[in-house]
Image: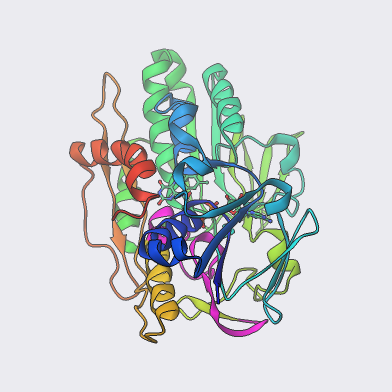
Amino acid sequence: MTENVLILGAGYAGTVVANKLAREFRREIARGDLNVTILDKDDMNINQGGFTFLPFGLYTPEDLERPRKEVLSPRINCVFGEKGEITGVDLENRKVQVKSGDTFNYDYLVIATGSTTDISNIPGLSEDYNTFYTSMDDAFKLKEKIDNFEQGRIAISVAQMPVSCPGATVKFAVMLNDYIKFMKTEEMCKNIQISFFWPMEPIGPPEFNKVATKVFEDDNIEVNRNFKLAEVDSKNREIVSQNGDREKYDLLITTPPHKSPQPIIDSGLTDETGWIPVDKFTLQYRGPAGNHNEVYVAGDAGPASVIKSGIGAHYQSLVVSHNLVNDIHGHGTKVSYMGEVGCPYIGAMPTPFTKGQAYIPSWSYGAPPESFEPTKLGWYIYRMYYYIHWDAGLKALF
Ligand SMILES: Cc1cc2nc3c(=O)[nH]c(=O)nc-3n(C[C@H](O)[C@H](O)[C@H](O)COP(=O)(O)OP(=O)(O)OC[C@H]3O[C@@H](n4cnc5c(N)ncnc54)[C@H](O)[C@@H]3O)c2cc1C
């Protein structure tokens, strides 16, 4: 009898799991003993990690997108568009419903639907919403605003946690500072202040916080901690925190709140934090829809307590694939996800006045990042990674 693995979402995590299974089960798939099907609402894979760099001209759109089919093994059954847009997930009956009205049954399910942004709970934000977080178009619109900005206060606000790659806004602020020094006249630079608004006290784990705090001090970027964005008063150009603090801005750049995609919430898969709970080691579903050993979760869709990043999604996808291989072979053994995540850090971007500097700190459940210094080599490795991403990362070759 043919067994069916169904993967929801063909972004980072879903693609890695699919490609790993396609390689491990090439014989079973060829014999028709196993089907691996992947669903997504559209057919372009976009590397969101590159959005941070677009306003500074460091990648082009061509660097950041590929048709999904080009990065997925031909052994995978791909269903994209309306026929792949998930509208409901019924774990009890092992059924997934899509927009076209079709349903998919499965023996094993991987939920890799990521996160989405939602500004509806911040009054006023839609009236002055500039962000690099949501699409290439938005990142280019923001670039235009930055390029035309002549004087005043640029407020960079991370509205709430958790967000996908919390460190992205930190490196954006550092690069913005270098970019302004390079692109604007000396007179303009004197009249531009960058202010960073962060919703927590520490900026990441202790060593990350230490290095980020130092670079902000050195770059004269003002840091406001524990500023959870509650409202944007666009008429008076003020942001308001949940504590009622008001701060003026001339250009507001926001990292918006994130949430699980609505069909995942509506299917009753999320807990009170709004994210999908799992066994933190095996990544099997453990939530309001019951305990399901045949359902795995990888990537941003997972629990609020695990930092959402492409690096984490990569490690989780390898663990999920490995466990699926064992399940399907009937071995019954499990490998454990140990909380491996990372968050690339940038100390400077290269301009005529600065050398590019970066480092990719990583950590796991019980082992926080060690002390680190961004380096020139780190910058090249980080920049290069976005090219390796397509042919090695997504293909699950490491
Ligand atoms: C601006 C920015 C910068 C970042 N920088 C970095 C970085 O430097 N390093 C790093 O490690 N990480 C970074 N990240 C985070 C990284 O991009 C994510 O953690 C990663 O993409 C998560 O992978 P995922 O597969 O869980 O989700 P995604 O890659 O978002 O994939 C989810 C997929 O599910 C699909 N989907 C959702 N809902 C449905 C539905 N109803 N029906 C069908 N399909 C659906 C989506 O279309 C999408 O293809 C950054 C993110 C952003 C936004």
Does residue 6 sit above or below 42 in this rendering?
Answer: below
Image position of 238 with respect to 292: above or below: above
Nearest the eye: 231 or 355: 355
Evaluate whether residue 216 shows in this view: no
Q: Is residue 246 left or right of residue 168?
A: right
User: Residue, x 35% and y 78% (percent of image)?
Assistant: 336
Residue positioned most to the front: 31
**Front in this rendered view, residue 121 or 390:** 390
Residue 1: % across, % down = 55, 77
Between residue 199 and residue 330, name the one nearer to us: 330
Q: Where does residue 235 sit, x and y in percent of width and height? A: 77, 33
Q: Is residue 81 left or right of residue 184?
A: right
What residue range appears in magenta?
287-314
Residue appearing at x 47%, y 75% in the figure: 283
Taking the magenta stretch, the answer to whether it contains residue 308 is: yes
Residue at (34% x, 74% y) in the render: 338
Place of residue 35 in the rendered image (x, y in percent of width and height, measured from the top left)? 53, 64
Q: Position of 83 compared to 313: left or right? A: right
Residue 184 shown left or right of residue 304 in the figure: left
Quarter of the figure with residue 181: top left
Instruction: State whether residue 21 is above or below residue 372.
Output: below
Q: How many marks?
A: 0
Residue 108 picture location, percent across and down: 55, 74
Q: Given the current orientation, which residue lies at the most extreme right position?
A: 101
Quadrant containing the C terminus is bottom left
Q: How is the image coloured?
A: rainbow
On the question of residue 13 being in view, the answer is: yes
Q: Is residue 162 magenta?
A: no
